[in-house]
Image (cartoon, rainbow, N blue to C red):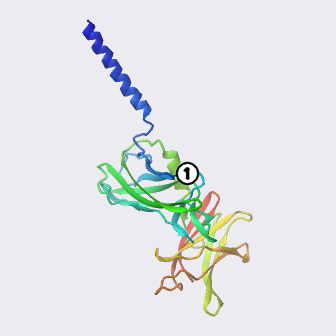
Amino acid sequence: MKAELHSLRWAALFALALVLGAMGSSRADDVSAWDADSRSAIRLIAGTISNSGAAAPLRAGIELRLDSGWKTYWRYAGDSGLPPKFDFNDSENVKSATVLWPAPRRFPDGAGGNSIGYPGNVIFPVHIVAEDPAKPVLLRVKASYGVCEKICVPAAGKVELMLTSGPASEEASLAAAEARVPKPVALGAGGTLTIRGAHREVVRPGQARVIVDVTAPAGMNIDLFAEGPAPQWSLPLPEPVDNGPDGVRRFAFAVDGVPPGSRIEGALLKLTLVAEGEAIEVTTHLD
């Protein structure tokens, strides 16, 4: 009898230890562990995945957590900074992984210019297409990114997460990040915001600028970012100039940062117009 009581007592203690261990772990199965340094941390989160079919891409997010006062960068960092790079090559059963970029903000870079990015925590949504939709996807990401306070330093992390069907604990956060991604629209199209046109203007012999006409409700704070057709382009940040007719608001930037051997005339530009709560993106050839 004593032996049986002893065994039962140990079995109960073992079961209690398992319960307490599970309670002590705050990480759900649909988020990865944080890979952290002294200023920032990175992890993967899963979105809600249905098992109704293979048509829709799988959804995940790369979450960056920054210390108070630190910033990180957009896909084009502006006058200075290090754009994030994400490598998915070590993933399993992944045909493609597309990173989406929430609308960024402009902020001083401390050297007289401006950078483009995120002053605080950010989630980069990722849409994944599986090689075989009937098999699980193991998402592995190697990330390199810059973080900036008074100084800017490089950072890196490695995270992985198995994507499985079912509801996700971070679905609301991921959906909010997806809602912040600029909506692709055609030139002149849109709703509250429109990008009506972009053309080159000669200021004086040997000096030109690009004028971009946009529309937005009166009094709405807006900002505009311009990217060239390849990462080697480093166009200046557009600045507001005198408004045009019929409520048109204008931005301009100097023809600068064009790689040797390339021409601004006819170049394929990507223009991103950002307002509070809304953003659009237009890809167009320069007139």
Q: Position of residue 2 (x, y in %)?
A: 27, 7
**Residue 156: quadrant of the picture:** bottom left
Figure check: 29 above or below 40: above
- Residue 34 at least partly seen: yes
Q: Position of residue 106 (x, y in %)?
A: 61, 65
Considering depth in this image, is 84 or 242 the residue closer to the camera? Answer: 84
- Provide the secondary structure element on which disc 1 rests: loop
Q: Residue furthest top?
A: 1
**Residue depicted at 55% across the width and 81% down the height:** 286
Residue where numbered disc 1 is placed: 67
Q: Residue furthest bottom?
A: 205
- Residue 190 at least partly seen: no
Considering depth in this image, is 7 or 125 the residue closer to the camera? Answer: 7
Figure check: 191 above or below 20: below
Instruction: Locate the N terminus and report the quarter of the image it occupies.
Output: top left
Q: Dot 1 surroundings within 10 Å: few (below 14), some, or many (20 or more)?
A: some
Figure check: 240 above or below 98: below
Q: In the drawing, does residue 55 fall left or right of residue 280? A: left
Q: Position of residue 13 (x, y in %)?
A: 35, 20
